[in-house]
Amino acid sequence: MNDQKLSISGQEALPPLSIESWQHRHVLDLDDFTRDEINLVFEIAEAMSEVIARDVKKVPTLRGKTIATMFFEPSTRTRSSFELAAKYLSADTVSLDSVKSSVAKGESLIDSLRTLQALGVDTIVMRHPCSGAPYIAAQNLETSIINAGDGCHAHPSQSLLDMYTLRRHLGDLNDIKVVIVGDITHSRVARSNIWGTKALGIKLTICAPPTLLPHGLQAMLNKCGLDHVTVEHDLDVAIRDADAVMSLRLQKERQQSGLVSSIREYIHLYQLTTQRLALARPGAIVMHPGPMNEGIEISREVAYSSQSLIEEQVTNGVAIRMALLYLITGGKIR
Amino acid sequence: MPEKVLLNSADIERALVRVAHEIVERNKGASNIVFVGIKTRGVPLAQRLAKIILDMEKVDAPVGSLDITLYRDDVSSLSFKHVVQQSNVPFDISNRHVILVDDVFYTGRSIRAALDALMDLGRAETIQLAVLIDRGHRELPIRADFVGKNIPTARNEEIKVYISEVDAVDKVTVRKPGAGGGEEHE
Amino acid sequence: MSPELLIKNAHIIDPGQSIDITGNILVSQGKIKSVGKDIKETGIPTIDASGLVACPGFVDLHCHLRDPGFEAKETIASGTAAAAHGGFTTICCMPNTNPPLDNLAAIDYVNGTAARKGAVRVLPVGCITKGRAGKEITEMKELSNGGCVGFSDDGSSVSNSRIMSLAMEYAASLNTPIIDHCEDTELSRDGQINDGWVAARLGLKGIPAAAEESIIARDIALARMTGARLHITHVSTAGSVELIRNAKKDGISISADVTPHHLTLTDEAVLRDSVKNGISFAYDTSAKVNPPLRSQVDIEALIHALNDGTIDAIATDHAPHSAEDKLCEFDAAAFGISGFETAFGVLMTLVNTGKIKLTTLLACLTHKPAGIIGGKCAATGILKPSSSADIVLLDLNKIWRVNTHNFYSKGKNTPFNGVDLKGSVAATIFQGIFAFRDNTLEVTG
């Protein structure tokens, strides 16, 4: 049996990566990740995928380390994904739910985090409704911070697992065409994917009605050299020949605040349906960061079709998060 | 100071043939053995042993590969990370005789990590250790069952194993201290 | 604390009287006695001001002293000390205190405290509406008699146009300006910074220029209708400048001020380019201010407006906050910059880069703001004999680094911390007495 490892798509294995290239003490956003670093995370996630597939899902790598999840916004899937990732690596986990914690008693964010640091926690996985909160944490603490989503700004582990999913199926991602459709203004997933796709050479199309796009978006794309991104309002145009389509959840509150005229009209123009999907490349991949509003941004048929990798994204999420915890928590960064 | 060749390609092949015979003898045949090579060079060595045994006994023993990075005891103190690669043991090791294969047997820590990994994969009947080179200086109470060649060394000497599947050539060399940098193969 | 003081050999610049000479100023009994080349007095305390510029003490139309109610952020004592450190001898404090300055007792409190503990002259601005709630107009006549030099609901806009027009009519009859904070709170709701590329980049909700411009346009129309004296405070956008310019052409009684930070920083200050320890110091709350820092295009328009007189004055909008109000998530951080002590140095960057002339700058800090609050007080903004001896001595060549530890203000919230500036206040004289004096400046005799 030939041990020379092939990635699942049958392409050549990536060249061995120098791990000294990893310089991050925190994972806050993908805007400062190089292509090599992202590929490194993928490489390690592959190994972690094998661990998850075992009967006994445990390796002793982070034994004795403590990972704290501090979620100031409700979340089941991301939080359990990180907690499982930590447990599979034999780390201890402690979980703070902001509703019951001291934050409800008026303690400041930094004080709450400092308490965790004083308790000896090794890494804090944090989700917060305010953009930039993990940066304050990183600036004021010694502990490593992994951003599990801050306001509308970033969700690096989600973007990593999205692209990892693409890589597992499409191999080399250079020049492939990906479309992200939905409420971009409020989407940290979209923003992190803008940076992630840049690093990997992916051509990204952002598709949304004008009211769901940030006013400064085009200026930002110009200013930050993000020329791999195109903005398009018409989904039927955007989706043409796409290799992958990612649908974002439309929150019902957006209609109440007037950002969409009606859910019905949104569905008509932006729902990912089987007919729309046919305009993409045959076999194009369908993704969604979850949770889905079936029947709104995505039809049930498409969500459960053979092209949908939505469930695989969840599995890959654990592997990616294991890779991040391994890189951040075990050992010191020079 | 240049590397001195201790074993050439033919020496290595002879050692492997002898080890393969010993394995078959000890286990009274090859019907219930499986090979697990420790990455990186333990894997082609395991494959060669399996091939020799296939020719001898007409039994095709499965070969798996094990990455022990996640089981290292020094993850916390490392200033940089080792790349984790995938392990691939696509068969059940329970109730089988596992021949663990590595290129150089030194402090014993890699073997300890490999034993932990194997414990997570199932309950082997026995685990037996086959190494190409034993260079001494054990830090843990672990012994090899099958040794290709004993090479006593000083701690500061560097033993390097080249296996053609990985390095394009077959040889084992030693380099004395003060000869400049180079990574120790564990 | 002598009743007499001679300032010798100063470069005297008094734009209000078109004076630009090297000469001396004689101060006696707290008033200016004479200004000129030939003053020869001996035996009195003297400052050799060679190499320094002497000009009227600065007049600030817009600041927050937080007293009464928010004394942790600032008090009248600490705020006036900071103002003196910044060269300001007359400051107009905004009424968003607690209780707000919407009644005579509150005004009397400010006046009394300032008289006892203030280092410089404090002129209160009264609320337009009771509690700044935008519903009932305050008793403007009584507040005016009590010493209010203007009316403002600063911090808020009067969103009900009918109420605003009535307030303007009433203020017009008192010949007192409305100092107008223009903000459409529906457009700016939940906004954190300028609605531009930085907001998109950082995932922060933006405050569009239209939030300011739409209310300016409305209030210009109301001023046209009522004949009120309208003063637009902290103008921040090119669109606003254009509206004001056109209103002036139309003969509307309108004036405007701009802050030092809006003249020199864009929304990119929130990004804070420096990368320290591998973590970007983005989300810099010290750059969070209302109205927000805008774009380079807006800065160019504001500077041009200063030069062509569309904007009449520079006001600091000094807004001190305590550390915990800023050391938190960006969304939760308070809006405001503690501006007294960096104002002159920051403004000198415009002079030093040739964007505006020194005399224009000094005019916008002295007689022009004084003119807007009118003759209600002794703050004339000019060095006229028998007026209050409010003088500031400036060292235009001194290079210094902003260090909030040296601030007299309790508010250390400034995006300029650590920045090197050229141009500083060497001394501030209020009513003939040193309210601030750099310790390298000696008084002899």
Image (cartoon, coloured by chain):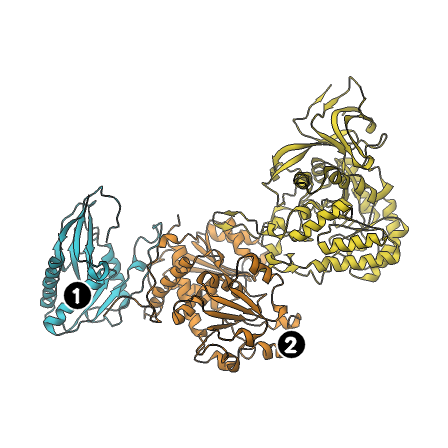
Chain colours: A orange, B cyan, C yellow
Q: Horizontal placement of B111 versus C97: left or right? A: left
Can you say whether C122 is above or below A202 in the image?
Answer: above
Residues behind callouts 2 and 1 on a single chain: no
Can you say whether A212 is above or below B184 in the image?
Answer: below
The residue located at (35%, 49%) in the rendering is: B79
Badge number at residue A262: 2
Residue toward you, B155 or C23: C23
Badge number at residue B48: 1
Can you say whether C190 is above or below C280 in the image?
Answer: below
Residue toward you, A63 or A263: A263
Residue A312 x %, y %: 42, 72
The residues tagged by marks 2 and 1 sit, at their Cα atoms, a distance apart of 68 Å
Determine which quarter of the picture holds residue B110.
Answer: bottom left
Kindly identify which chain the residue marked by label 2 belongs to. A
User: In the rendered image, is residue A279 in sight?
Assistant: yes
Q: Horizontal placement of A148 versus C415: left or right? A: left
Residue type beneath disc 1: Arg
User: In the rendered image, is residue C98 in sight?
Assistant: no
Residue A61 x %, y %: 34, 58
Kindly identify which chain the residue marked by label 1 belongs to. B
Residue A214 x %, y %: 61, 64
